[in-house]
Image: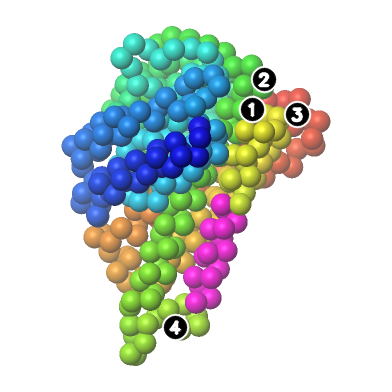
């Protein structure tokens, strides 16, 4: 989309986020999540990747995911707004009439593999079915069951039932594009969460005083925040390059870049949030503070789709084998 159009969309999402952000874990309630998801649906962001060519680039979608991750929001942007529409676009398939799909993952929240295992509908606020991408490229629609427990209090996860129907089958290039896109979008949201929390930590260090001086004037705190900022920027560099590759390079190259980005984010985003919690001190360990909502998001997010070990194993494969064989990143 044109730059002015994207700025407008981004500002709409920022206004939405400021309105529906939660102030503490006590604000995370089903009624609040449903109301926020309805308001998010009214923004029409689900159409950004439904057309061919898409209205928004992958880079623009990644930036929106960053914005969504920056504030504690009980809404499904990744699953229902960015990931499911992209999967349907790749398949050339329409959504079920009146339905809102999300994405089905293995119970451990990784890409489904060849072994039969229960599925969960990930990021399922407002969804009524989930799309599962099988290792052979077949995509099935599955029904949703009861809410499933999750450490991430902001992310709705539900059990998934048996397949309702076959939606389509991805080509080899389509599978690679899909995995790369999913990794990039998830990494972008986690990076946005880490960036926002480190920024809040810097602001707190400027205003919190000990021994008559702002704690941000102490060299130990400065080093801690400087390291966290470098980690966030490493995440941003890797993630935005991977998003650029999806817009401009082959699916094979984009998948390699996406794996690198998610591996970097899995490690650095978590460490950056830990550093921010140290700056906040004891208040960050309380239930009422938002710190643990960010920590829960990045800790769980580091396991979503693929862990660092999964990604490094895939990246270590010889290039001809990596190009010839479609993996589920396991």
Which quadrant holds residue 23?
bottom left
- The answer to which of marks 1 and 3 sits earlier in the sequence is 1
Within 10 Å of disc 2 (Cα), the crowding (few <14, some 14-19, many 20+) is some
Label 3 residue SS: helix
Which stretch did the figure color magenta?
222-236
- The mark closer to the camera, 4 or 2, is 4
Question: Which residue is identified by label 1?
Answer: 176
* Residue 305 visible in the current orientation: no
Asked if residue 39 lies in the magenta stretch, the reply is no
Label 2 residue SS: helix
Within 10 Å of disc 1 (Cα), the crowding (few <14, some 14-19, many 20+) is many
Question: Which residue is identified by label 4?
Answer: 217
Extreme-bottom residue of the structure: 211
Mark 4 and mark 2: Cα distance apart in space: 54 Å
Mark 1 and mark 2: Cα distance apart in space: 7 Å
Nearer the observer, 288 or 207 = 207
Within 10 Å of disc 4 (Cα), the crowding (few <14, some 14-19, many 20+) is few
Residue drawn at (43%, 9%) of the image = 165
Question: Which residue is identified by label 2?
Answer: 172
Nearer the observer, 263 or 7 = 7
Mark 3 and mark 2: Cα distance apart in space: 10 Å
Residue 203 position within the rendered picture, expressed as x and y whole percent measured from the top left: 38, 69
Label 1 residue SS: helix
Mark 4 and mark 3: Cα distance apart in space: 51 Å
> Taking 279 as reference, is 321 above or below it?
above
Within 10 Å of disc 3 (Cα), the crowding (few <14, some 14-19, many 20+) is some
Tag of residue 323: 3
- The answer to which of marks 4 and 2 sits earlier in the sequence is 2
């Amino acid at each position: 989309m044109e730059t002015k159009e994207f700025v407008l969309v981004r500002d709409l999402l920022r206004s939405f986020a400021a309105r529906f952000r939660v102030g503490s874990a006590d604000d995370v309630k089903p009624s609040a999540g449903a109301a926020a998801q309805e308001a998010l649906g009214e923004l029409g962001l689900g159409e950004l990747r439904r057309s061919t060519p898409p209205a928004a680039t992958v880079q623009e979608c990644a930036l929106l995911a960053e914005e969504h991750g920056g504030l504690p929001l009980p809404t499904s942007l990744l699953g229902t707004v960015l990931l499911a529409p992209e999967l349907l676009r790749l398949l050339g398939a329409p959504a079920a009439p009146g339905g809102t799909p999300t994405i089905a993952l293995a119970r451990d929240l990784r890409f489904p593999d060849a072994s039969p295992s229960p599925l969960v509908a990930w990021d399922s606020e407002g969804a009524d079915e989930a799309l599962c991408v099988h290792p052979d490229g077949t995509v099935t629609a599955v029904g949703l069951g009861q809410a499933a427990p999750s450490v991430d209090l902001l992310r709705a996860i539900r059990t998934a039932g048996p397949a309702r129907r076959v939606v389509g089958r991805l080509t080899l290039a389509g599978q690679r594009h899909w995995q790369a896109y999913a990794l990039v979008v998830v990494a972008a949201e986690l990076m946005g969460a880490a960036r926002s929390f480190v920024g809040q930590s810097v602001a707190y260090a400027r205003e919190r005083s000990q021994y008559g001086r702002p704690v941000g004037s102490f060299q130990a705190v400065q080093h801690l925040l400087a390291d966290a900022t470098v980690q966030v920027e490493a995440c941003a560099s890797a993630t935005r390059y991977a998003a650029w590759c999806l817009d401009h390079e082959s699916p094979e190259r984009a998948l390699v870049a996406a794996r690198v980005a998610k591996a970097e984010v899995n490690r650095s985003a978590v460490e950056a949030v830990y550093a921010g919690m140290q700056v906040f001190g004891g208040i960050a360990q309380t239930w009422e503070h938002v710190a643990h909502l960010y920590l829960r998001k990045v800790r769980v997010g580091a396991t979503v789709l693929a862990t660092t070990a999964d990604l490094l194993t895939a990246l270590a494969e010889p290039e001809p084998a990596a190009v010839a064989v479609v993996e589920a990143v396991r």
